[in-house]
Image (cartoon, grey):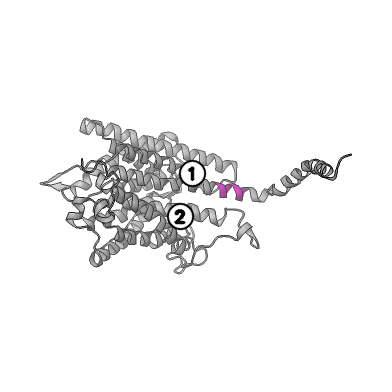
Amino acid sequence: MMNFKTLASAAVLLALPSLGLAQEADVTPPNEEIGFIFTTFMFLVAGFLVFWMAAGFAMLEAGLVRSKNVTMQLTKNVALFSMAAIAYYAIGYNLMYPGDGWTVDGVLGAFKLAALEPVGLAETTPDLTYASVGSDFFFQMMFCAATASIVSGALAERIKLWPFLIFVVLLTAVIYPVQASWKWGGGFLAPGIDGQVDFQDFAGSTVVHSVGGWAALAGAILLGPRLGKYKDGRTVPFMGSNLPLATLGTFILWLGWFGFNGGSQLYMDTAGNVADISRIFSNTNAAAAGGAVAALLLTQILYKKVDLTMVLNGALAGLVSITAEPLTPTLGVATLIGAVGGVIVVFAVPFLDKLKIDDVVGAIPVHLFAGIWGTIAVVFTNDAATIGQQLYSIVVVGVFVFAVSFAIWFILKMTMGIRVGEEEEITGLDMAELGMEAYPEFTKG
């Protein structure tokens, strides 16, 4: 005779198939939620990729600075990303996306903390035509942090840590969100309401990259060049500490850019949107390849030898160049747009040196000069763009960001100083500012 436990076990086994079917029925989303789910998922995955760009910037900068300054660059990159996350939550997100809560209509957004939906969307009605607030915040915050990373490399090897981080907080809390709201938050550069400028900048050649470039340029001018960089009318090259690391950083950035541009499609709810995302990925890759090859060939022609650092920056310039419009070009046109970015970098780096503007990693040529080019190049493939609107928007954003950044850098310089002393710079910021070295076994050799 079967005992009670045996009977109970048999009953559970018989019930399992029906329980499984009931569970599946409970979790199958209704049709109206499917687009919301896929777009939210896209933002999260794209956000992961853009987050990985923080590692790319850190590795690129660590490889291109001298060994005595590597720990400082790593510290700055971890700190700036973390501070950007907090600043964007506290001020930046709603300043950038105020909805109907503009402080000054179309110009200055809302001042309030970012807030997510309740757990499980309890007692709320989400906008099922878009994505979750959490995924949108997560994705957009990564763009904000990337802007600060651009500044870090340009000002390396002579800037103090804390003034730099103070600037980062102001950049990510106020400067970046305010100008981004003008385009992406529905401000006065957003598409066509009551005669507004219809500025076209798909993923941020101007809104993200040139902003970092303008902020870096203002800082570099006030900071001055590294000791010994310009001597007797010539530029003295300072070789990076680890070119394999710089190359790894470039590939990481290249990977992250697929999320940067692909996620900016903003929707993954139809077959058309998914096809467009794949088109964006392909064009993004083509532009990077075009920039790298252009720099490869041009440095061979000009200098009789290929310059790896130029090739790396050529790829990044190609990526920046296509960011303003990665959807509408053909693969061939995307390659050419990126190639022009690579050419720009090869000529812009020595141009800045002639002006004695010291940019350690080439961030200003890559993100500012190629960003301007990419914003202009939109007119070749997107009928919604006009050269007048694109140039106007470039100037508006540039003047605002450069002027405010210059003022902040100037105030920091006058109050607490932004540059380390000569002895500290010669010793290296790792020991002078942090008291630790990245390569302690080799620095004495």
- Residue position for label 2: 141
> In the rendered view, would you say 184 is above or below 334?
below
Residue 104 position in % (x across, y down): 44, 69
Q: Mark 1 falls on what kind of element?
A: helix
Q: Quadrant of the N terminus?
A: top right
Apparent side of residue 9 relative to residue 400 in the rendered image (left or right):
right
Q: Which mark is residue 262?
A: 1
Q: Nearer the viewer, residue 84 or 356?
A: 84
Q: Residue furthest left?
A: 232
Q: Give, as a three-letter code, the residue at label 1.
A: Gly
Q: Which mark is residue 150?
A: none
Residue 340 position in % (x across, y down): 33, 39
Apparent side of residue 116 relative to residue 188 in the rendered image (left or right):
right
Q: Nearer the viewer, residue 250 or 311?
A: 250
Q: Quadrant of the C terminus?
A: top left
Look at the numbered discs 1 and 2 and tell me whether their residues touch, using CB distance below 8 Å.
no
Q: Nearer the viewer, residue 269 or 221?
A: 221
Residue found at x 30% / y 61%: 403
Residue found at x 31% / y 46%: 61
Please tell me whether residue 39 belongs to the stretch shown in magenta: yes
Q: Which quadrant of the structure image shows residue 313? A: top left
Q: Give, as a three-letter code, the residue at label 2.
A: Met
Q: How many marks?
A: 2
* Span shown in magenta: 35-41
Please tell me whether residue 144 belongs to the stretch shown in magenta: no
Q: Local crowd at mark 2 within 10 Å, few (<14), some, or many (≥20)?
A: many
Q: Mark 2 falls on what kind of element?
A: helix
How far apart are the two marked residues, 1 and 2, measured between alpha carbons? Answer: 16 Å
Apparent side of residue 29 relative to residue 155 in the rendered image (left or right):
right
> In the rendered view, would you say 151 is above or below 339?
below
Secondary structure that dominates the magenta span = helix
